[in-house]
Amino acid sequence: MSTQLKPTLGTIHLWGIAVGLVISGEYFGWSYGWGVAGTLGFLVTALMVATMYTCFIFSFTELTTAIPHAGGPFAYSRRAFGEKGGLIAGMATLIEFVFAPPAIAMAIGAYLNVQYPGLDPKHAAVGAYIVFMALNIVGVKLAATFELVVCILAVAELLVFMGVVAPVFSFSNFALNGWAGSQTFGPEAIAGMFAAIPFAIWFFLAIEGAAMAAEEAKDPKRTIPKAYISGILTLVILAIGVMLFAGGVGDWRTLANINDPLPQAMKAVVGDSSGWLHMLVWIGLFGLVASFHGIIMGYSRQFFALARAGYLPASLARLSRFQTPHRAIIAGGLIGIAAIYSDGLINLSGMTLTAAMITMAVFGAIVMYIMSMLSLFKLRKTEPDL
């Protein structure tokens, strides 16, 4: 049975995957950073992380175009450091991409619960897994086109959110007690800024997942750099804009540590029954869906690549009649669904389940980023003509 993926994706599809993988981070998750660092402390942290990601993407693009492989970081580290290096990077990437989707699925449930208070968010989260695993199994071109459409809608809705709340924006609201609950910068603010790093990373987490579609990209040396560079610029602008406008509409402390900060911020401006609010909830779901759907695509390619290389059972590298790694898609989904119901098992320093899963995903990402950069430096020396 075939284990070779087919190139079908152009620049616009890759941009949609890169931005779509991440854009849920503009809708939820980041406001937990306010809870530990305050608005000003988190703004500084987010700007530093945005700078890091921008630099990282330029370097990562070099690796992706030189080694277009479904394994992404796993393939780069394996080439640079051998089997053990590949295993470390591959498993770190799996941790990132397997634990990010259940956090997003829980946010999908929270958004739906705003519209349907009787709906159990966990049941909605499981339903989301079933629907989008099926869509990914049907075919990558269909999946990537869907990703592009929902990504564009999600970007448009963030712009609408900023436009609706802009008339009541006040920087004094945003800055009030903005240094970890204090008006002045001090040791507590510094500690809070470090604690907020995972939630600033959440703004951009998983953009590197577009590399896992590299085998399915047409002319990867041309299309991937365009997609990555335009993608990171899109995300930086949206992240800073959303954070500023949401924090300036009222008491930002009511938005910290919740899964639906944007609907709650808009509700404070337009009220419970406004059409703008209902539009944000429904179209905002597209932002969550774009990332959820895209990361399912990413984790399946990572399972597929690790299985094809012999690190995981070979059956996970089998392709369906639609030329998609269906067993890998299902395997990651089962782990994610189990995580949704693991409240009693996943408990990090008293964090909510969503915050704990975000932290675990970020831990995997940081290890993967380190391995990717070490691979870049090593390959520049050992294979300068790569």
Image: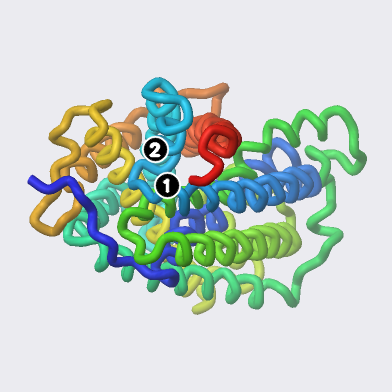
- Looking at the picture, does residue 296 appear above or below residue 186? below
Amino acid at the residue labelled 2: Ala
Residue occupying image coordinates x 47% and y 38%: 354
Pointer 2: residues within 10 angstroms few (<14), some, or many (20+)? many
Residue occupying image coordinates x 44% and y 69%: 11
Q: Residue furthest right?
A: 184
Which type of secondary structure does the marked residue at label 2 adopt?
helix
Whether residues under marks 1 and 2 lie with C-beta atoms below 8 angstroms apart, the answer is yes
Q: Where is residue 164 in the image (x, y as percent from the top left)?
A: 64, 76
Q: In which quarter of the image is residue 333?
A: top left
Visible residue check, residue 111:
no
Give the residue number, with chain letter if any, for mark 2. 75
Visible residue check, residue 386:
yes
Specify the quadrant that holds the N terminus: top left
Badge number at residue 67: 1
Amino acid at the residue labelled 1: Ile
Q: Which of 23 and 32 is in front in this view?
A: 23
Q: In which quarter of the image is residue 327?
A: top left
Residue occupying image coordinates x 79% and y 56%: 174
Q: In this view, does 124 lie to the left or right of 382?
A: left
Badge number at residue 246: none
Q: Position of residue 77 (x, y in %)?
A: 45, 32
Q: In this view, does 330 lie to the left or right of 280?
A: left
Q: Is residue 368 left or right of residue 241?
A: left
Q: Position of residue 266 (x, y in %)?
A: 60, 67
Which type of secondary structure does the marked residue at label 1 adopt?
loop
- Looking at the picture, does residue 16 appear above or below residue 180? below
Q: Which of 249 and 29 is in front in this view?
A: 29
